Amino acid sequence: MAEKVTVSIPHKLGKEEAARRIKKGFASAREKGGGMMNFANETWTGDQVAFDISVLKQNAAGTIDVRESEVVIDVALPWLLAKMAEQAKVLIEKQGKYLLLEKK
């Protein structure tokens, strides 16, 4: 059974800059590929991006809502990853901050 994990990451970038960095982060993650976490099927609709991700050979889907002072990441984790939901939440927050917002 899937479990939804939600992570909010505050920022002081403004909506446009946060979205730009998220797009750059997705592009960078796809370029590097082959790691523990692989992103695919990035689809933007306004200030929200829907994506598919593979972690430890488990597929998940999620969205990122870009807001003026935070981004909200929602990911529906498959059964195996849902068993590790708390650790997954920490990983999502850490990678979200690093890949999507803090990198200049």
Image (cartoon, rainbow, N blue to C red):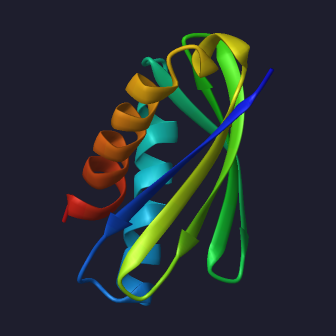
Q: Is residue 33 visible?
A: no
Image coords of residue 70 (percent x, y): 39, 75
- Is 7 drawn above or below residue 4 in the view shown? below
8 or 19: which is nearer to us? 8
Residue 24 locus on image (x, y percent): 42, 61
Residue 88 in which image quadrant: top left
Q: Is residue 27 left or right of residue 44?
A: left
Give the side of residue 33 with respect to residue 70, left or right.
Answer: right
Quadrant in which the C terminus is drawn? bottom left
User: Does residue 92 appear in this view?
Assistant: yes
Nearer to the camera, 49 or 8: 8
Q: Residue at x 47, y 75 (%)?
A: 19
Q: Is residue 101 left or right of residue 16?
A: left
x%, y% of residue 39? 58, 37
Q: Residue at x 41, y 54 (%)?
A: 25
Q: Quadrant of residue 21?
A: bottom left
Residue 82: give x, y in percent of width and height.
62, 21
Where, quadrant-wise, is the N terminus in this rendering? top right
In the image, is residue 50 above or below residue 79?
below
Name the image quarter holding residue 61. Answer: top right
Residue occupying image coordinates x 43% and y 28%? 86
Total marks placed: 0
What residue appears at the point 36 percent right and 32 percent down from the top-left corner? 91
